[in-house]
């Protein structure tokens, strides 16, 4: 049985594929008339469109949560060690490893519970480009939390000839419950389909992930292990995993696997049709 999860597989998205349900044809006509009312000589105002997108995506958060829970791996890290819950995304290495000769050894194999995520909020707005503040970009902010994130963590004490014995080895010493995250992806805008694409912020990271502080709650007696080094390393790994969720095609809609950006583009296209988008509006 393979332990490798690939975050879904990429497909070319046909702009005619309708991913988000419309309540009725009259609702579409109403929105179209509203867009036209806010249109200027160069097309539909971006700022107005983003307020519509925010409302629509917020309504879809329960469906998006179900899609993500079904597609993201349960575990993340060194999947060949200590039987992580499957599916597991194999990083090929420990999330943390340090051996202080004749003193202590600590390693974090994998973290599980990624599929307990819940999306709670989404906001789309224009902001200054973090790299070039003179240029505006679209900020797509998605917030949520993990119900639980158990970490497979070993702590050992080392003695004469550097032989180590287990102090504890479990999945309940870290990393807590209800851990909140906030992901911000910066998007470039263009007037025609596909309207949004991931902005190039090199060398800055995109997306940016913020995560609640991780803490080791199990007491470590007898050795001076730098617990913050462990939690910082594991937190960084989870931030990487969350960022991958934003970038990879993991939303399965009508048999087509798409990214969050493609998901939004399809929605915008279904309502704008051939109308241009004013990225400066």
Image: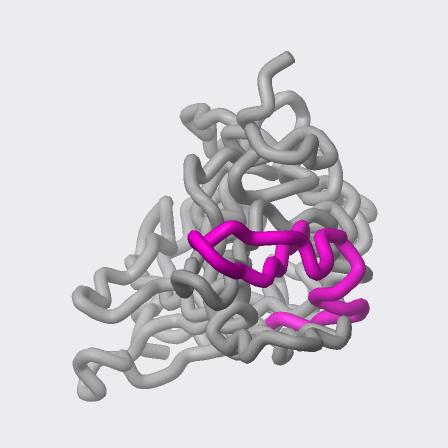
Q: Is residue 34 left or right of residue 66?
A: left
- In terms of depth relative to the viewer, which is nearer, 157 or 77? 157
From the image, give the main secondary structure of the stretch colored magenta. strand
- In terms of depth relative to the viewer, which is nearer, 152 or 30? 152
**Bounds of the magenta segment:** 152-181
- In terms of depth relative to the viewer, which is nearer, 237 or 187? 237
Q: Is residue 24 left or right of residue 215?
A: right
Residue at 22% over, 87% down = 133
Dividing the picture into quadrants, the one containing residue 134 is bottom left
- Residue 168 at least partly seen: yes
| Rendering coords of residue 167 (x, y %) | 70, 60
Going by the picture, which residue comes out furthest to the front? 160
| Rendering coords of residue 145 (x, y %) | 73, 66
Residue at 49% over, 25% down = 9
Residue 44 belongs to the span the image colors magenta: no
Dividing the picture into quadrants, the one containing residue 280 is bottom left
Residue at 61% over, 38% down = 251
- Residue 273 at least partly seen: no
């Amino acid at each position: 049985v393979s332990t490798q999860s690939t975050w879904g597989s990429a497909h070319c998205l046909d702009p005619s594929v309708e991913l988000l349900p419309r309540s009725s044809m009259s609702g579409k006509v109403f929105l179209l008339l509203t867009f036209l009312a806010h249109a200027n000589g160069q097309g539909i105002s971006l700022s107005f469109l983003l307020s519509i997108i925010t409302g629509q995506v917020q309504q879809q958060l329960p469906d998006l949560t179900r899609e993500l829970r079904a597609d993201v791996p349960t575990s993340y890290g060194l999947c060949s060690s200590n039987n992580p819950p499957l599916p597991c995304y194999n990083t090929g290495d420990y999330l943390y490893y340090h051996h202080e000769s004749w003193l202590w050894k600590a390693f974090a194999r994998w973290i599980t519970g990624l599929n307990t995520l819940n999306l709670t909020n989404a906001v789309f707005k224009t902001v200054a480009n973090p790299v070039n503040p003179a240029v505006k970009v679209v900020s797509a902010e998605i917030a949520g939390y993990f119900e639980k994130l158990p970490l497979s963590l070993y702590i050992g004490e080392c003695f004469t000839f550097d032989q180590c014995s287990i102090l504890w080895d479990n999945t309940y010493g870290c990393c807590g419950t209800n851990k909140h995250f906030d992901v911000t992806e910066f998007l470039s805008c263009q007037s025609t389909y596909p309207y949004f694409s991931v902005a190039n912020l090199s060398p800055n990271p995109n997306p940016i992930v913020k995560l609640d502080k991780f803490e080791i709650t199990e007491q470590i007696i007898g050795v001076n292990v730098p617990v913050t080094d462990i939690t910082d390393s594991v937190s960084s790994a989870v931030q990487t995993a969350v960022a991958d969720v934003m970038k990879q095609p993991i939303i399965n809609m009508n048999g087509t696997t798409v990214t969050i950006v493609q998901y939004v583009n399809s929605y915008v296209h279904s309502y704008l049709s051939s109308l241009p988008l004013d990225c400066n509006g």
